Amino acid sequence: MRFFPYLLVVLLVTGNASAECRDKECMPNQYTAEWENTTDWIFHYDSIFTIGDNWFIIFERLEGPSNPDSITFEFAKGPSKITDFDNNVTKVNSGSISFSGSSFIEESFHNVFYINFTRNGEDGEIFSSYELEIQINKPPAEDLVFLWGGMTVFWLSIGLYVLYISSKFHELSDKIGVENNEPREKN
Amino acid sequence: MRYAREYCGVIGFILVLFTLYISLIQTGPAKFFTAPNAQKLFYFHVPSGLITYLAFMMVVGGSAFYLYNRSDYADKLSKCSAELGLVFGFMSLASGTFWMKAEWGGDIFSRFLTDMRLATTLAMWILYIAYVVYRRQPETFTVKKNAAILGLSGMVMVPLSYLSSRFLRSHHPVIVGTEDQGSLDPSLRFGLYMGLFGFLFLYVFLFSTRMKIEDMERRILKTKMEEI
């Protein structure tokens, strides 16, 4: 009987939710790329893309003379996004881009993620490309915890009851055997 | 038949294990459910719920028979069946609570207060806790008679719990005897029947063991009384 309140407490505690963090401090990985041998760009990202959660990459420009016209973010086998900079107006110091949590369906490892810098100069397109390695992770379904919780309580309760009547049966069999001077009654 | 009780237990255990295989491995996550994995509790929740009703109806029958002709066997039957009804009822309520939390979400306390199927089933279960607790005292004629009257109240509680999802406000699905029964997926139906038969055999095994324990207890008590 004491188990039931514990069960209720567990059920109450399990219903929590965590918010997405979009700050660069929350990103466990970072990568530094160089543009035209003059400007360093730092990319903050999480090398694990969790299916169902939006995936962010935050970039910031360190000191340097120029911006590219655009940065393209592209999964080798997946979606891509582009950030255009208006070079004539102002230099961009930071920004971010996100990919939807539903961009992937299946788990896969060692995916190549390209960061491409481009600028249309007088000599044509200047291009430099960098590669990151991203793991696509499919988390276990949230309702599995309820399935295992239900199953555990279920099997524990019938198991404990069987143990209880089994021990009681043997105890009484012994008692009757002692009183009548007989061997234990067969179960 | 010799060893009939043991055979029942073994067959029941094998059928329940087979149900476990069907639910967890053979059938994939259920379609059209918010919690497709937790839906697998269905194969255990429904059979244990039906066995709970069977056990409590046996208490009702035994109590009525005891009040009619003071049959000692009917009294024993009620007592043992009530205990088993509590065990299976707990299994059904607990598995249902986990499934409900995953499928419907929300606060489980308010669900138990506002959903009539849940409320009446919990009330029925608590009523039989009172019955079992009451029976833990020395068994005089008055105790047996009062317990039989209490046990007979299941005549109202069991049908009320069973029918509440049809006639009262409830989210609990109704399958038996409705159009949904025919639309049950064959794999789902097979697993359900397998679980139902498994738990029925387990119930018969546990019930006959519990009856035997009750016999032994009464035998010891009788010997002691004779000695005094």
Image (tube, coloured by chain):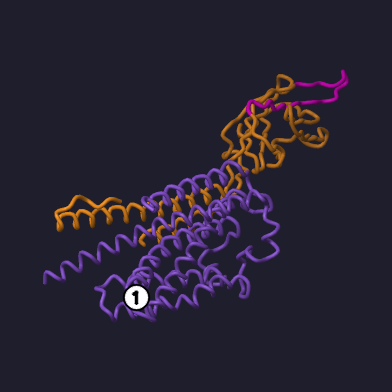
- Does residue B88 appear to the left or right of B209 in the view shown? right
Can you give x and y, in whole percent of width and height, for residue B40 in the image?
57, 50
Among the chains pictured, the one given purple colouring is B
Task: Check the image and report above or below for B184 versus B154.
Answer: above
Identified by mark 1, the residue type is: Ser
Dominant secondary structure, magenta: strand
Q: Position of residue A107 (x, y in %)?
A: 64, 33
Magenta-drawn segment = A109-128
- Asked which quadrant contains residue B55, the reply is bottom left
Q: Nearer the viewer, residue B122 or A66?
A: B122
Q: Which residue is mark 1?
A: B71
User: So how many labels did they put on this image?
Assistant: 1
Q: Colour of chain A?
A: orange
Task: Answer above or below: position of B174 versus A124.
Answer: below
Q: Residue visible at 70% across and 25% down?
A: A39
Tell me which residue sits at (57%, 41%) in the image. Answer: B25
